[in-house]
Image (spheres, coloured by chain):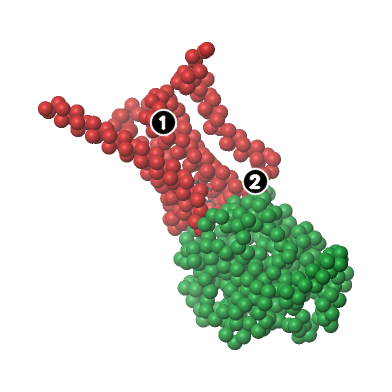
Amino acid sequence: MNKDTRPASFLTSAAAKPLVHAACLAPLVWLVWLGVDGRFGPNPAEFINRYTGDWAIRFLLIALAVTPLRGITGLAAVMRFRRMLGLYAFFYALLHVTSYVALDQYFAWAAIWRDILKRNYITVGMLALTILTALAVTSPKAMVKRMGGRNWQRLHRLVYVAAVATPIHFFMMRKGFQIEPLIYGAVAGLLLAWRAGAWIRARAQGRARAAARAA
Amino acid sequence: MIIRQRPLHRIRSCEITPKAAFDDRRRVLRALGLGGLAATMPAALTMGLPGRADAAWRPTQGKALSGTPHPRYNAKVLGEDPAPLEVVGSYNNFYEFGTGKGDPAENAGSLKTTPWTIKVEGAVEKPGTYDVDDLIRADDIEDRVYRFRCVEAWSMVVPWLGVPLAKIIRRLGPTSKARYVYFETLFDPDQMPGQRRPVLEWPYKEGLRLDEAMNPLTLFAVGVHGQVLPNQNGAPVRLIVPWKYGFKSIKSIVLMRFVEQQPPTSWSVANGREYGFYSNVNPDVSHPRWSQATEKKIGQNNIFGLPIRQPTLMFNGYEEEVAGLYAGMDLKKFY
Ligand code: HEM
């Protein structure tokens, strides 16, 4: 038996990153194929906008699942993929917003600006995009160094705000009472709840240690 | 085939076959092994009613259907090309079959449109349960090209086949108490799987003021593009109210009730702030989700193959016909 079949050794292998990149780009390749095959339907803007929005929120949640995954499984190697997964969330969000600006609004900037101010779901989407942009821009290692770990971490905690804002954006945009956005919202809620739990545990431990030292 | 046009006043309400009698005559013919005959034989013969119109249409999917072209509501006068059938039949909001635009075309095969009855009740002289092809006569069917504007800021030009609702309502004889007409869609989650999810309060409910229902523009549509209405478009019979947002044009109707009070409607119950009872197309009354100032014309593409965007017209371009209905009303308040 080859013991290299353990997940940790795959995760740390040189082949892992290209494979994850390929997996992350697969939805885009599929989208292009659907277009080539003429399967966007009569309203291509809507199709592309929804498709890329769906993948943006999925990658955001996948990226947010990395830390809990390490906590639960103890597989530290998954952390290698956190940044790129987050960047793919930003990438699909950018495609999503570009499709809205270009294919839906035909660059009618005045109308877009009115939408951002007046349509609550777009205001919320704009908030999420602004956060994802700030995080993407500050994601290179050099930026972490430049900002200092503490500041960097403080800024990157804004991802929790994006994790709340995006399902709200999704829910508000759908008409009637629809289950899909609620499922995304529930997943985001679980991922944030896990962090809250971990934080409370860590604090309790810290206090216990401090108490032990004082004693 | 020659379709005889009879003046409206000569169509008597007794010519509408009550459901029981209709079923009876079919049962008899079927028992005699004449089922096929029952389907094709002129109803006048089978019922022995004098001058009974030929029930020449049947809500059979894909079957050809024609109607008298309207001198005004046609593509030429409108100056716009209708969206092709593939578009009209593949881009639908019909949440009873799923919330995606392509879901209805995919899932509506489970809807059984024959036989189909519509219950008529309330403040009306001739209540009863009517077979749809008795309520809607082949020789009343008109071919009318209308603009169709969805609240989601897209629109299509659609060649409907239908009967002015006023004709049907007059035959049914609303009493003086009838001020509104209330409609319901079929409720049957086995046929309409989307009803298993609480997207809206099922069955789908809609309503019109009686004078809106009687306006010559309002249709009971049974076909589109020269054929019987595809299931995903609301077969076998749906309302078409071209100056209102699309959700007012309720599909797959099984109930018509004449009432005194303004009835609840599905979307106004779900979110009264966003969807009012009137829901007239109005570029000046913006919706919280969509600016209604412009619309995307699905089926009319620019050089990039994308739908063109155009300003939305007051009452969807039917101001002349319907503005009078709302004289003195604040349309910002009664949206
Ligand atoms: C300026 C920023 C944004 C704008 C203008 C915007 C615009 C839109 C629009 C117009 C829709 C509705 C499409 C329709 O009605 O068919 C939509 C839906 C959606 N958006 Fe955004 N969005 C923004 C940011 C984001 C971000 C950052 C994410 C995710 C990370 C996101 C995820 C989604 C999702 C999941 C949907 C629903 C797709 C579906 O129905 O399947 N959006 N957005």
The answer to which of A179 and A94 lies nearer the viewer is A179
**Residue B56 percent coordinates (x, y):** 82, 69
Kindly identify which chain the residue marked by label 1 belongs to: A
Location of residue B115 (image quadrant): bottom right
For the C terminus of chain A, the image quarter is: top left
Amino acid type at image mark 1 = Leu
Residue at 32 percent across and 38 percent down: it is A197
Q: Is residue B296 in view from this perspective?
A: no
Q: Is residue B160 above or below residue A69?
A: below
Label 2, on which residue? A40
**Residue A175 percent coordinates (x, y):** 52, 57
The answer to which of B252 and B131 lies nearer the viewer is B131
Label 1, on which residue? A69
**Residue B270 percent coordinates (x, y):** 49, 63
> Label 2: few (<14), some or many (≥20) within 10 Å?
some
Supply the letter of whichever chain is green. Answer: B
Location of residue B214 (image quadrant): bottom right
Residue at 53 percent across and 57 percent down: it is B199
1 or 2: tag closer to the N-terminus: 2
Q: Residue most toward the bottom?
A: B176
Amino acid type at image mark 2 = Phe
